Image (cartoon, rainbow, N blue to C red):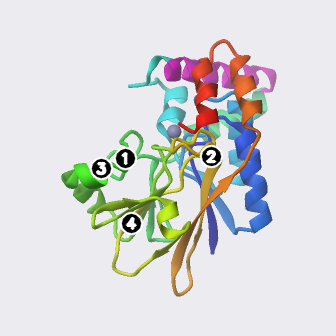
Amino acid sequence: MRTALISDIHANLSAFEAVLADIDARGVDRIVCLGDVVGYGPDPVECVDLVASRCEWSLMGNHDFGVLYEPTNFNAAAEQAAYWSRDQIESAARTDPERGRARLDYLNRLRVRVLMDEEFLCVHGTPRRPINEYLFPDDAQNSPAKMEQIFDRFDRACLVGHTHVPGVFIDDPDFLRPAEFDNLFRLEAGHKVVVNPGSVGQPRDYDPRASYAILSNGGAEATVEFIRCEYDIQRTVDRIHAIPELNDWLGDRLLEGR
Ligand code: ZN
């Protein structure tokens, strides 16, 4: 079974379309999304509709939650983007009430946790605080108690998003960036891992290309392949700059991947 793992699209339609084309060219059995479909970016309505039509399921991320309910612990730019995204979704619903209702219904039913294939625990943040907690690369060195508590909460592998930094946490503990294992990580029996496929729509590892991963499992061994994908970044930057409610920094940061 080949599963495309995507996360943190953040309403970046240009990046999302490029990733979907790349996924289609490689061929997978299903696509799953680890949350944050909306927030920050210029195309929330289109991205929700694409996730609903192309993904087997998506999780509730903190930005999806913030747009639907109330943004909490957001910085000013993120909060303003959340309110603007909500306005977009509401005005699209006034234009086309039937699709608008279906879209809101889809968002409202996003789950905070999915156990995939009985061995992959999927959450947006961490298994302790599934929507909001970050598991940062530095935590592997600096927060042993946090690492232990998180690794205690699943049996084999946990799939997360939220930090927008692709890589694998192992139970040494350590964090491995994809370049350290040539972009192909093998999950060995008896070792637990937390896998983050990175962000489709707002990468933060100083590589501006869209990030996602393909999990292959069901055979003798499971692997995760990390993939980067070029897209028309300037198109998204220009769209963000043209929308007064979206802070220019939300576009500028895409050019640097941070
Ligand atoms: Zn995010």
Q: Quadrant of residue 153?
A: bottom left
Query: What is the spatial separation of the Cα atoms under label 3 and label 2, in whole angstroms?
Result: 23 Å
Q: Residue at x 62, y 34 (%)?
A: 254
Q: Which residue is mark 3?
A: 139
Q: For mark 3, does the 10 Å Cα neighbourhood hold few (<14), some (14 to 19), or many (20 or more) residues?
A: some
Q: Are marks 1 and 2 in contact (CB under 8 Å)?
A: no
Give the residue type at disc 4: Val
69 or 162, nearer to the observer: 162
Q: In the figure, 52 relative to 155: above or below?
A: above
Query: What is the spatial separation of the Cα atoms under label 2 and label 4, in whole angstroms?
Result: 21 Å
Q: Which residue is mark 1?
A: 136
Q: Which residue is mark 2?
A: 200
Q: Secondary structure at mark 3?
A: helix
Q: Residue at x 30, y 66 (%)?
A: 171
Give the residue type at disc 3: Asp
Label located before the other in sequence (1 or 4)? 1
Q: Is residue 49 visible?
A: no
> What span is colored magenta in the figure?
77-96
Q: Secondary structure at mark 4?
A: strand
Label located before the other in sequence (4 or 3)? 3
Query: What is the spatial separation of the Cα atoms under label 1 and label 3, in whole angstroms?
Result: 5 Å
